[in-house]
Amino acid sequence: MERVVISPVGKDKYELMESYTYKGIRIPKGYVTNGADIPRIFWSIFPPNSPEYMSAIVIHDYLCDEYPKVSYKEADKKFYEAMLDIGVAKWKAKTFYLYCNFYHQLKEVIKGDK
């Protein structure tokens, strides 16, 4: 799996410098992400902008921005798949997936979405 090409833009933002395609998902050049939304206390273990998993983060963020066209559940599954495809350790991919899935379920309960 190829990696995304990003450039920092502003504080904690990254712009996609080339369009990026993963399993039929095309993310346009110029798309902006903030990296992973990881609580600061965990940054020493899981940096939010690590190249190790940034490609998967861009895919996930893009799919989440497509909500409700793409469900959070689907975005979280693609995120997990992409993490494994780029060689992230299974335990780490599963940790990120479970965190995202929990966050999205909580978000839907708070908003009242189904």
Image (spheres, helix red, strand yellow):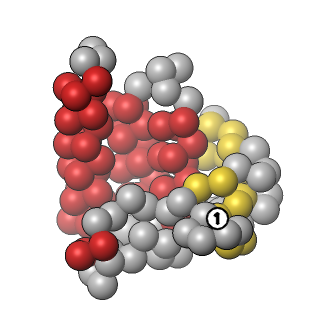
Which quadrant of the structure image shows residue 106?
top left
In the rendered image, the vertical position of residue 32 relative to residue 13, given as above or below = above
Determine the secondary structure under disc 1. Answer: strand
Which of the image's four quarters has the N terminus? Answer: bottom right
Describe residue 78's horizontal placement relative to residue 58 as left or right.
left
Which of the image's four quarters has the C terminus? Answer: top left
Residue 96 image position (x, y, % from top left): 29, 57
Q: Which residue is mark 1?
A: 14
Identified at 20% across, 42% down, the residue is 102
Identified at 69% across, 40% down, the residue is 26
Residue 99 image position (x, y, % from top left): 23, 52
Amino acid found under the numbered disc labelled 1: Tyr
**Front residue of this view, candidates 88 and 103:** 103
In the rendered image, the vertical position of residue 99 relative to residue 4, given as above or below = above
Residue 39 visible in the picture: yes
Give the farthest residue toward the bottom: 44
Identified at 47% across, 75% down, the residue is 50
Residue 84 image position (x, y, % from top left): 38, 58
In the rendered image, the vertical position of residue 16 relative to residue 80, given as above or below = below
Identified at 49% across, 72% down, the residue is 49
Residue 63 image position (x, y, % from top left): 52, 37
